Amino acid sequence: MKAVQATAHANIALAKYWGKANATNNLPAVPSLSLTLEGLRTTTRVFFDSSARCDEVYLDAAPVEGRPLERVVALLDQVRALAQMQTRAVVESRNEFPTAAGLASSASGFAALALAATHAAGLHLPRSTISSIARRASASAARSLWGGYVALPALGDCAEPIAATEHLPLYMLVVLTTRRQKKISSTEGMALTASTSPYYRAWTESAPLVFEEIRCAILDRDVERLGAAAEHSALAMHASMLAARPALRYFSPATLSVIDRVYELRSSGLASFVTMDAGPNVKVLTTPEHANQVEQALRELPEAVEVIRCSGGPDAYIAGDA
Ligand code: DP6
């Protein structure tokens, strides 16, 4: 069996996924829609090794253990079941992010792993099936199989591309307010929100409408409407988290300073809209026309440890036999 290497890019949701309809199968409770990002990528090499006694996984050359290893093994088990084989694998994954920490890499990681592992097992599957394999490991990873704007329906088995990057070329400015890793995973945070937040139901009921608004705004190339709805999706998701017990609060004082600055920039006529995930970093959606000015203003903030400018990224791809 030959080793195969695949590359996938991170994505940032404009319509957020938060909550599971079925935790065992990892089916999302709400529809989500993301933009795949150029520049933030993971390259993963998989080799099914008949002499290996267990799966071996390395991330940036360090051995992976515990829960992260279990998640990788579970994805490899899906692939082995489809290929009707038992062979263990050696997995080597590299995050090519401009910064070592502070950004979620699970989406690009599991997408690259699903693509590399299926090919390394000799399976020739439709991209939608590979997206489904990635989705079971981490739902946001299902979206990283495609470039541009990608949707994952509520209860959806796999993601589906909505529009190419060129349809509506936008930039995402990733503003790092810290390089520290998050303390609570999305999976745990979702479970806590669903079981304790009185606003979780309101979130799951309203999310499909916001998703539809975002989808239509992308198709209509309506940046104002897209930005406003994406900002609302992120803040509504965080409102449901804040009402959990104990509260799930990802906002730091630095987060709020960045958001305030984005609001000022918007008042001054620059296209700039905030989105946030399960961490204190802020992502700012802007247009090619305004990107330089918005980026410059954000770089001047003392709270911004680093600003990474990303355009829309490509489909995940096989990076060649390795
Ligand atoms: C806030 O995909 O990491 O980034 O399916 O449990 O692995 P699991 O969750 P994950 O959640 C991502 C949550 C989010 C929003 C989003 O990307 O849609």
Image (spheres, rainbow, N blue to C red):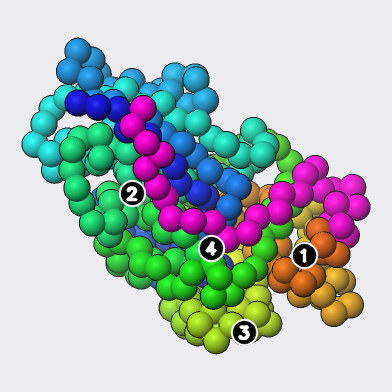
Q: Earlier along the polypeptide chain: callout 4 or callout 2?
A: 4
Q: Is mark 2 within 8 Å of ligand 1?
A: no
Q: Are marks 1 and 3 in contact (CB under 8 Å)?
A: no
> Position of 314 compared to 317: left or right?
right
> Position of 165 compared to 123: left or right?
right
Residue 188 to residue 284: above or below: above
Report the quarter where the C terminus lies: top left
Q: Amino acid at mark 1?
A: Ala
Q: Give me the residue at 25% from left, 27% from top.
A: 2
Q: Earlier along the polypeptide chain: callout 4 or callout 1?
A: 4
Q: CA distance from mark 4 to mark 1?
A: 16 Å
Q: Which residues are magenta?
A: 296-322
> Position of 215 compared to 120: left or right?
right
Residue 112 to residue 227: above or below: above
Q: CA distance from mark 2 to mark 3?
A: 31 Å
Between residue 121 and residue 104, name the one nearer to us.
121
According to the picture, the residue beneath numbered tag 2 turns out to be: 134
According to the picture, the residue beneath numbered tag 4 turns out to be: 35
- Report the residue that reaches farthest toward the left: 84
Does any portion of residue 245 appear in the rendered image?
Answer: no
Q: CA distance from mark 4 to mark 2?
A: 17 Å
Image spot of residue 135 (x, y percent): 33, 53
Q: Which mark is residue 222?
A: 3
Image spot of residue 40 (x, y percent): 58, 46
